[in-house]
Amino acid sequence: MRELEEEVPVLLCKLEKMFPPGFFNVMQHLIVHLPYEARVGGPVAYRWMYVFERAMHYLRLKVRNKARVEGSIVEACIVQEITNCVSLYFSDHVRTIWKKNPRYNNGGTRVQNDGCTLDVFQHVGNLHGRPIARELSREELNAARLYILTNCSAVDRFRETYEDEKYASHPNLPSEGLDEMMASEFVEWFEIACKEDPNSDEDLWNLANGCSSRAYSYSSYDVNGFRFRSEISEKKRRRLKTVNTGVCLSSFISETEQLEYYGVIEEIIKVSFTAGRKIEMVLFKCRWFDPIKGVKPNAKLGLVEIKWSSRLSNFEPFAMAHQATQAYYLHYAYSRRDLRDWRVVYTIQPGTSLSNFDDCANDPSTTDEYFQEGGQLGSFSVDGGKFVDESTEPRKESDDVELDPSEIYWRFKCDPSEQEKADGVLEENLTRKVKQMLHEEKAAAIKRLKKKGQLPTELTEEDEDGNRWPTKEALISAKRVDFGIDVGWHLLCEHWNSTEFRGLSLTNKRNRLANGDTVFHCSGARNVVATRQFLKLKTGKDPGISGAWLHTHKLHRGTDEEQICSQRTADHWEDFDKAMKNAHGENWEEEHPDLDGQIIYEAAGRMPHGRLGIANELFSKAEKAKFKSKRAMASQPVQSAKEERLERENKYLKQEIKRLRGIELVVQSLAEKGGVDFDGIMQSATNDLVSYTHLNCRLSAIEPIK
């Protein structure tokens, strides 16, 4: 750290040689003090002031008597603590900061269970939306009845009797086999056993007779302080601000072990039992994730991850609404391939409960632990010996820990053995960055000078070749206010108006136009991938990457004048088309709709200036390096499209020369018969043609100023 403290001023001096003065402000100067501050103060998390500033803000709000500031704060804190403590013991209907009114109490259809003595029918809630009648299939009806029976405490004695009978008849029956028998036989067995049992009451007989196969589907249901919505309802309503389809259920697989089931509500249905008094039950039909292979708890962080594509193997889609808690599934912000199918579970707390207040207050074990809200328990430890000096003696400068510079080279600088190479890379990158910055400054200055998209004539000057450039005085007047000192800007303007800079600019322009035309994207702001999706939605057919790229490089699409944006691009595409036909057949656009980078490299002009002939932006540098390392393919066409075009033009010119030669002989014969000097007329016409050609070349060399 001491070495870094000594090297920072030298580094800033080097940067001052490379960057203009406008680049530097107080933030660059702050680097000088950071090493000393880190060495003396230690980690910043132990000395920042955000927590205290926030606390001071809250204390300021409590002051009512500015003549007695401290007394006002003390009285306000005492009143706040007392009222918060007392409000925990008010009745449930009293609205306080800890016991607010129910989050969802805006009416709806209530479930009718008046007078029912069974525990599973004691929970009330409100259904919302227009009821839609539907018929439950035989499989769904059996699964719904079985789930209600196995979760009703009044049926426990019947279930134990059924299990004893099965174990008596099948001594070696495994638990999986018993579950299969329960799923297929228990509902009918319970119906017979309940009617034969003299201790069964009216509600139990009603439950044994089963619910009606006609159920009603609703869009949402309010229960236990939550609002649940079905996935179908949320897809229809596009402007919802929250996702209320996630659900979580807890199941005890033993006396000490608990298994969490996570799922998504597909449908909210209400079933009715009408054999006796009418009682109703709200069930969630869910898409459950695999609780074993699809759920991954992280005990260290207190998080739970679920695999979105996993599914529960058994057909158990239903859950009673009052048993469910709400959950939300968060995507990972980082789109790594191994994380795309995983979500992080966030369990929602109901707005009407203060969970486990008394238990947490009396449990000393919670003082050194942290919790994710509604999640798993997590813990962490910090080795304070590395950061805190627990000795009672005052600190001395000699107590500072001496760090080995080689331990921090990997973070702050390169290895000493590669210092020369690193300096070269730094100089190259900074030189490129400075050129880019100067180019942007010049472009911004010219833009400020323009009026209605053009530079005024009085702000430009013409060189000896007829090219027009902005004057030095015009560029000086376009200086930004926050650029820096005027001397630096004047030097830049003088450089931009020098003969060397203008000559380099013209050379670069000629190099860019050396091939006669340029390749450009003519599909607006929509890139190739977005164009592919757009064409797929529009035509109902996937054009592939090749079809989408060709679409983005065509002009006058859908008309008789449709053509590729430039002749060079058309030649490269024709070469690529021939190579693809040789490699994959005539129907390659349907069988291989994606662009083959290796064929583009071999067939479409290789890689001049490090760029492919077509679709250069669709391939990374690593892929281009692989193209270079491979040998030429046998499918490469013998003659390129450019060569064929030149051959056709050459053949046409030969025919045109032959025709003109015949006309010349006829005119010469007629001139001889009329006594006219044919050679003199031809010489005069040749001189006029040369003068006209020179004039056109001079006019075309003038660079338009934008």
Image (cartoon, rainbow, N blue to C red):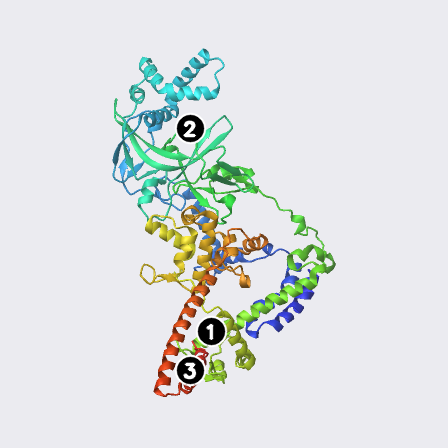
Q: What element carries label 2?
A: loop
Compared across the picture, whether 33 is left or right of 117 comes to right
Which circle marks residue 543 in the picture? none
Q: Could you tell me residue 375's position as x and y percent?
A: 48, 40
Residue drawn 60% across the image and 65% down it: 429
Compared across the picture, whether 243 is left or right of 135 comes to right
Q: What residue type is labelled 3?
A: Leu
Q: Which amino acid does label 2 sit on?
A: Asn
Q: What element carries label 1?
A: helix
Query: Circle 1 sits on which residue?
Result: 444
133 is higher (above) or lower (below) than 483? above
Query: Circle 2 sits on which residue?
Result: 314
N-terminal of the two: label 1 or label 3?
Answer: 1
Q: What residue type is labelled 1?
A: Ala
Q: Nearer the viewer, residue 80 or 346?
A: 346
Residue drawn 53% across the image and 59% down it: 606
